[in-house]
Amino acid sequence: MAILKHQIADNIRRLQSSAKMTDTALAGQANIDPRTLSHYRSGRSRPRPETVVAIAFALGCNPIEIDPSIEDEFKRNASWFIEATSETRALFAEWSALSNEIQQQRSDLVTTFKTLQQHCLFIESQIQENQVRVELIERQMSAKMAEMARRQRLLEAMAGQHSKRSPNLGLA
């Protein structure tokens, strides 16, 4: 590991010199702190793979020219990415199936609510029709009762006149 850190430091210095870049320019283009770059150039610390890529991009070289072991890191990351991608695809397929199921349930609910709404409108119209019928029946009953009351009074009046004409036979 210590040998590799020094090999990386030598490679950075060599490639930086070939590119005729100052520490400030390289740090700026690689988007790293100049002190951190100084640690990499002196072999005090080893850059992470993404930092190696950023430095290589700034120097216009292949990351393997800076860190020969990075290829193994790329292969590990690639296999992890492939595995993660297949897991992601499986999760996406599962999510998609759930999404379709949820859409179907939503559609079923919308249909159910529309049906309920139609039933409610039908029931409401039936209630209104029944209210009209009840009012009509109430008016008819009121008219019949008024007619019956009128006839009752007429009968009572006729009965009263009849009793005045009939002699009392003394049957009590």
Image (cartoon, rainbow, N blue to C red):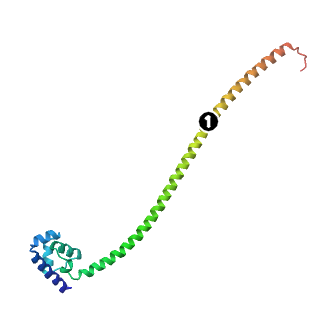
Front one among 71 and 33: 71
Callout count: 1
Give the left or right position of residue 116, taking residue 79 as reference: right
Measured from the top left, where is residue 107 in percent x and y?
Answer: 50, 55
Residue depicted at 48% across the width and 62% down the height: 101
Measured from the top left, where is residue 82 in percent x and y?
Answer: 35, 75
Label 1 element class? helix
Residue depicted at 11% across the width and 75% down the height: 19
Identify whether 103 is placed above or below 142.
below
Quadrant (top left, top right, bottom left, bottom right) of the C terminus:
top right
Q: In which quarter of the image is residue 128?
A: top right
Front one among 157 and 21: 21
Residue depicted at 21% across the width and 85% down the height: 1
> Which residue type does callout 1 highlight?
Gln
Measured from the top left, where is residue 13 in percent x and y?
Answer: 12, 79
Q: In which quarter of the image is residue 79?
A: bottom left
Measured from the top left, where is residue 61 in percent x and y?
Answer: 17, 76
Give the left or right position of residue 170, taking residue 43 as reference: right
Outermost residue toward the bottom in this view = 3
- Residue position marked by numbered label 1 in the rendering: 131
Front one among 125 and 162: 125
